[in-house]
Image: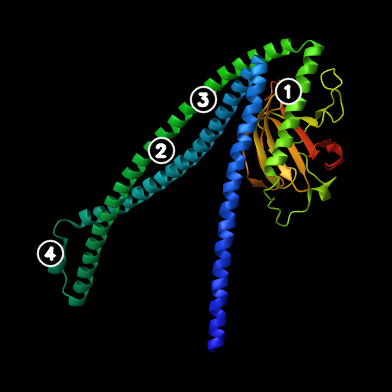
Amino acid sequence: MNALRLLLVCCALWAAQAMGQDAQRTADAERELGAVQKRIRALGEEITETRGKQDAVLGELNKVEQRIAVTQTELRRLADARDAQQKQVDATRVEREQAAAALKAQQALLGKQMRAAFLMGDRAHTRMLMQQDDAQRVSRLMTYFERLNLARSEQIAVIDAQTRSLREIEARYLDEQQRLDQLSIEQRQVLDGLEVTRESRNQVITQLESQIRDRGTALKQLERDERDLQALLESLRDLLSDIPLNLGNDPPFAQLRGRLPPPVKGRVLAGFGQNKGGTQIKWKGQWIAAPAGTAIRAVAPGRVAFVGWLNRYGLMVILEHQGDHYTLYGHQDAADVRLGEWVQTGATLGRAGTSGGHRQSGVYFEIRNGRTAVDPVRWLQR
């Protein structure tokens, strides 16, 4: 028995030590991931800032589009808050109507009791005693009168409580309605500001379009865009190489070839391998048309490796997958994920838009195996 007790104690100590080591490893991994996240953010900002210095118009475009994204996020927050407040107002309105109906019913019942008492007169008890010879009958009637008076008192107490409750509900309803009205005003103000910012963006895009009308200038711009994206991806590979992916039971990315759902459903505006802007530079992915605000879905499980702006690609989310694979989602108006977050297939990454200086709303989608861009058509479901 002593040997068994000793064995159990040793097992418990070993388990506690293992749990402590696991907790320490988890904490170390989280700290390391946090440090990497800061470096990735700095990397994205550096690339954007460098291009902004090279081209003032692009720099201004990035600033304007970032303001738009922040405003879109605030609008969604306000819309969600307003929807929740509207539900609360509606629920309180129903509660108020039910309380008013119950109060009315109680008042009607009390009215009947009062009317019955009135018809019997002020000295009903005395008359009853004087007119009745049967003691048992008198006793039953007295009991009836006592119960009637008690019920009437209870009815008055119930009505009093319901009246107070109704007043409280009325006050709460008024406060909730005022909160709803305030949210509506804030939403309107943010929308007005968004319209002004979008007008500024249109002016910047007009400048950008006139600037790259020349084919030589357009070629230089596109070459810089390609270099920026390539530099970003190579830096991400280096920064994330020592942080293992949380694969769980998810199948390897390579096994999903031909089975990936599209990030959005829409017409392909530009396909892999087509020429960009009349130059010899090829598209490395797909530009898919989608109404502004359409949810962009993850095509496979992965870790969010980047959330930020890249010139002409706009607001971009990059997912890292097993086997040195990456999926890229650009031209977003707003992102719904955080750097380092693990997402599953179908998770909403952001919203389709026009960021990157485009007038056509949609999403830019690309798949990379290491440094090499691959044709999405071969990977997506047919």
Q: Which of pointers 4 and 1 lies earlier in the amino acid sequence?
A: 4
Q: Which residue is mark 2?
A: 176
Q: Which residue is mark 4?
A: 126
Q: CA distance from mark 3 to mark 4?
A: 75 Å
Q: Amino acid at mark 1?
A: Gln
* In the displayed structure image, the side of residue 382 where residue 354 appears, left or right: left
Q: Amino acid at mark 3?
A: Val
Q: CA distance from mark 4 to mark 1?
A: 92 Å
Q: Amino acid at mark 2?
A: Glu
Q: Which residue is mark 1?
A: 360
Give x and y (percent) for residue 287. 78, 29
Categorize mark 1 by other alpha carbons within 10 Å: few (<14), some (14-19), many (20+): some
* In the displayed structure image, the side of residue 291 where residue 178 appears, left or right: left
User: Residue at position x 85%, y 37% from top?
Assistant: 377
Between residue 304 and residue 168, name the one nearer to us: 304
Mark 4 secondary-structure assignment = helix
Mark 2 secondary-structure assignment = helix
Q: Which of pointers 1 and 3 lies earlier in the amino acid sequence?
A: 3
Q: Quadrant of the C terminus?
A: top right
Cβ–Cβ under 8 Å for marks 1 and 2: no
Between residue 372 and residue 255, name the one nearer to us: 372
Q: Amino acid at mark 4?
A: Thr
Q: Which of pointers 3 and 4 lies earlier in the amino acid sequence?
A: 4
Q: Which of pointers 1 and 2 lies earlier in the amino acid sequence?
A: 2
